[in-house]
């Protein structure tokens, strides 16, 4: 199985690449559309500001490719946020528009960013997760100042509570999945989620 990590200059590429290699996946990190088209699945990572990320993606020419892909695609952290319609970060900026909803800054909380370990509450079980194999401890590692709001509830897979703000942690729609936290930094449960997603990809391509 080959996984293409989309390189647009703003991703935590090394840690994601290493985590995927532990899953016995062939990993290619590239911004080349032709090479990404040879992958069985895609990962859109991201660290930084939403407007800068969309600008970089536009410069690569990959926006139409990402929007039209039928391959399983996983957005991580900022990569998940980019899958939404728009963001208020710095200036109102259009996103990729896969998910309905808006990325907005936390308000009324004692500390920004939301940084550290938090418990995920599953709202539904995606097809790639084996319910019987789910670990009881579901803590994941977050680092973010903005979160997805006004989204379609049917697309919310799991959320975390941050000072009474419901933070979408996992979202899913068709072949697209997003994780607001960093699965590659989230210990055993993070490894479990990445491995489950990769297993789901394998089952679709075999």
Image (cartoon, rainbow, N blue to C red):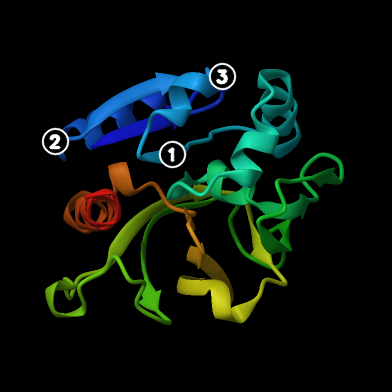
The reply, left or right, for residue 54 in relation to residue 31 is: right
Q: Earlier in the sequence, mark 3 or mark 1?
A: 3
Counting from the top left corner in percent of width and height, residue 131 is at 21, 78
**Whether label 1 touches label 2, CB < 8 Å:** no
Residue highlighted by disc 3: 9
Residue highlighted by disc 2: 24
Residue highlighted by disc 1: 43
Is residue 164 at all visible to an observer of this figure? Answer: no
Mark drawn on residue 18: none
Out of 98 and 22, give the one closest to the viewer.
98
From what the image shows, is residue 51 above or below residue 153? above
**Whether label 3 touches label 2, CB < 8 Å:** no
From what the image shows, is residue 62 above or below residue 172? above
Q: Secondary structure at mark 2?
A: loop
**Whether label 3 touches label 1, CB < 8 Å:** no
Which residue is painted at 44% across and 20% down in the image? 35
Out of 63 and 75, give the one closest to the viewer.
63
Is residue 63 at all visible to an observer of this figure? Answer: yes
Q: Residues within 10 Å of mark 1 (few under 14, many from 20)?
A: many
The alpha-carbon separation of the residues under discs 3 and 1 comes to 14 Å
């Amino acid at each position: 199985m080959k996984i293409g990590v989309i390189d647009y200059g703003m991703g935590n590429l090394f840690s994601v690449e290493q985590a995927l290699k532990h899953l016995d996946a062939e990993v290619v990190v590239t911004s080349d559309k032709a090479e990404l088209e040879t992958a069985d699945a895609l990962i859109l990572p991201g660290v930084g500001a939403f407007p800068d990320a969309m600008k970089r993606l536009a410069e690569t020419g990959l926006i139409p490719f990402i929007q039209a892909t039928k391959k399983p695609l996983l957005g991580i952290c900022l990569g998940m946020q980019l899958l939404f319609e728009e963001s208020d970060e710095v200036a109102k900026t259009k996103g990729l528009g896969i998910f309905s909803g808006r990325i907005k800054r936390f308000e009324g909380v004692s500390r920004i960013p939301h940084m550290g370990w938090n418990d995920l509450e599953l709202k539904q079980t995606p097809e790639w997760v084996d319910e019987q194999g789910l670990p009881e401890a579901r803590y994941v590692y977050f680092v973010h100042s903005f979160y997805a709001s006004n989204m379609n509830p049917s697309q919310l897979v799991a959320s975390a509570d941050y000072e009474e703000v419901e933070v979408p942690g996992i979202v899913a729609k068709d072949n697209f999945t997003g994780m607001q936290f960093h699965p590659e930094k989230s210990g055993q449960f993070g490894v479990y989620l990445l491995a489950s997603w990769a297993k789901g990809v394998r089952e679709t391509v075999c």
